[in-house]
Structures are given as C-alpha cells and as structure tokens.
Image: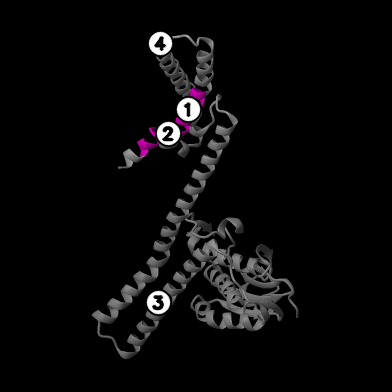
Amino acid sequence: MSAARTFLPDTRLGTLRAQFTLVIFLLAFLPNLVLTLTARPGVAPTLMALWMVLVAALCGAVGYLLSGVLLRPLSRLKAEVQRGDFAQPHQAQPHSDDPGEIRALRGAFADLLERLSTEQARRNAFMATLVHDLKTPLIATGHLTRILTDHPLPEAERREVGRELLTENARLLALVQQMADAHRFEREEVCVSTRPTDLRGMLDGVARRLMPQAQARGLTLCVTGHGTAPADAAVLERAVTNLTENALRYARTRVALAVTPAGVEVHDDGPGLGAPLAELAQPFNAQPATIAGQQYTAGTTGLGLFIARRIAEAHGGRLTYARTSGSPAFPERDAERHGDPTAPHSVFTLNLPEVTP
C-alpha cells in the first residue's frame, strides 16, 4: 500500500512535472495549430489531422524532456532525502547546478532534520534520565520490602525500615514531579500569581523541610537575611528547593540560604559546576557532568537547574551562578568547625525584581 501511495503522485496530472509538461506542450502546440490552420486552408482534412497528431506528439515529448531537465535538481533532492543523505552533513552539500530556490529548500530540509534529530535525542535522553534516576530508589524500596516480608523484625527495627521506605517513596515522588515539571516548563510558560512574599519565611520553611537531608550528610544548613518581593510563593519555593537539594548533594560541610537585595541565594562549599550553567540547566540532557572527578548524570542536577531557571524567568528575573572566594552567608563563628571561610564557594542566585528589606 505504501509503495502504491509513493508511486501515485508521479502518474497523476497533479504532479509538478505533469503540469510543466502540459504548459510547455500548450505553448508549443497552440502556435503551430494556429499557423497550420491559417497557412494552408486547402489541405486535405486527413493530412491535416495526421500533421496535428505529429506536432502534438513532438510538443508533448519536448515538454516532457524539458520538464525533466527543469525539475532535475528537485528530483535529485527528493532522492537524497529518501536515501537519508541528510543524516550526514557532508553529503547534504548543494550541487553546482542547483538554482537558488533548490538551495534554499535544501537548507530548510537540513534544518528540519537537525531539529528532528535533536528532538529524538532529547527523547532518548529523557528515557535514560528516567531509568537512571528512578532505578536507585526503586532498588532500595525493593530491598527494604524484602526485609519486611522475609525477616521477623523487632518493633523498633520494623519502624525504622518503614521510615526508610517512606523516605525512598518520597524521593521517587520528588523525581517524578521534577520530570513532570521539566517536561511542562519546556513546552509552555510557567504560570505565576505574584503577591508580596516574605522571602525569609519561605527560606526558613525550605530549611526545616530539608534539614534531615543535611543532618544525614553531616552538613550545616543555615538561613540569613530578610526581605520581601512580589512572587508566587509556592512556585518560587520549588525553585529554591531544587537548588538547595543540589547544594546538599555536593556540599562538603555547609549550605546557606540567603535573602539579598538581588533576590534569593543558595551557597555551598562544594566543588562547583563542571560545565557552564547554560549547558547544565537543560531538561533531559543525557550527557554526564564531571564534578570533583566524579560523574553525575545531568538528569540529577540539570532538571532542578532548568526548573529553577524557568521559574526565575517567569518572575521577571534570571538564574545566575558564580564561584567566589568565601561567602558572607556563612557565619564567621563556624570558621573553626568548617575550615577556611575564604575558601571558594558556589553561589546560585535567583534574581528577583523589587526586593525590599
């Protein structure tokens, strides 16, 4: 059926070659018809009919051949697309006899196929990210479930396993929510309803919720500064949560959340980004990032950074990253516990307009 569908356009009058042939035929035949009828009015009808048939056949053949010559670059382009030559950039170069219109069409095809290839790569990256990021908590959940079902445990241990199950389940839900948010934010605008928001209160809430993660890694998590800004508190809190979770994952000893005149900052004393922020803050990027000699999937960090960037843009701001020597967000009284306070720190800033003390 598909072969017949491919063949039909070449045999019906609606094809470009058939139309070219008809136009050339009419342009050649009609003047001959007029000249023949007016030049020799006394010629026998049979001879006249034979002559007209011969002229018509000749004009049709000339029209068919000329249309083939005119459409040769287009036919060649069609064959190249069918062979998949555009998959290799060096094979998609224009020919010397290609007219300007065909060169433009060739460029449009190349751009379209490049976009399709990029979209397919992003879909593949999404599946790779989904499998990688969900595998660890799923394995942990299965292991904890087997412990509960296969071994009689004392009440205290059973409760502890139950708490770990809830933790892994929360991690799964958070990953799924991140992926859903990234997929939605990639295709549509982030909707926000702004109102005066206490930024310090929002940061305190994020710190309380993530404190167990900080304590599990032996990290200090503190909040500094005060300020108010027009923002969608629930949406902005998701951005801050994503940045803070990333900071807690990579920090060596401490993480700080700060309200500043520029907006909201997340500080950590980790090794910093292994690639530019613009490269990492992309959804469903399958390329791993190397940080302090260790590879992390971009899905682990990139989704959170992408969501934070889109949320900042929806508030009329932007997400920035800087690597600084020391951080004023870390209290000096912690210097003895955490080492040199002037050591390099990473600072992610959600720049917000109209921050007031």
The residue mark sitting in front, 3 or 2, is 2
- Local secondary structure at mark 4: helix
The quarter holding residue 307 reads bottom right
Which quadrant is the N terminus positioned in?
top left
Q: How would you rate the neighbour count of disc 4 (Cα within 10 Å): few for under 14, some for 14-19, many for 20 or more?
A: few
Instruction: Count the marks.
Output: 4
- Local secondary structure at mark 2: loop
> From where the camera sits, is residue 271 visible?
yes
Residue 194: % across, % down: 66, 77
- Distance between the alpha carbons at the discs numbered 4 and 2: 30 Å
Query: What residue type is disc 4 on?
Result: Leu
Residue 317: % across, % down: 68, 67
The quarter holding residue 43 reads top left
Q: Are marks 1 and 2 in contact (CB under 8 Å)?
A: yes
Coloring applied to the structure: one colour
Precedes in sequence: disc 3 or disc 4: 4
- Magenta region, mostly helix, strand or loop? helix
Numbered tag placed on residue 169 in the rendering = 3
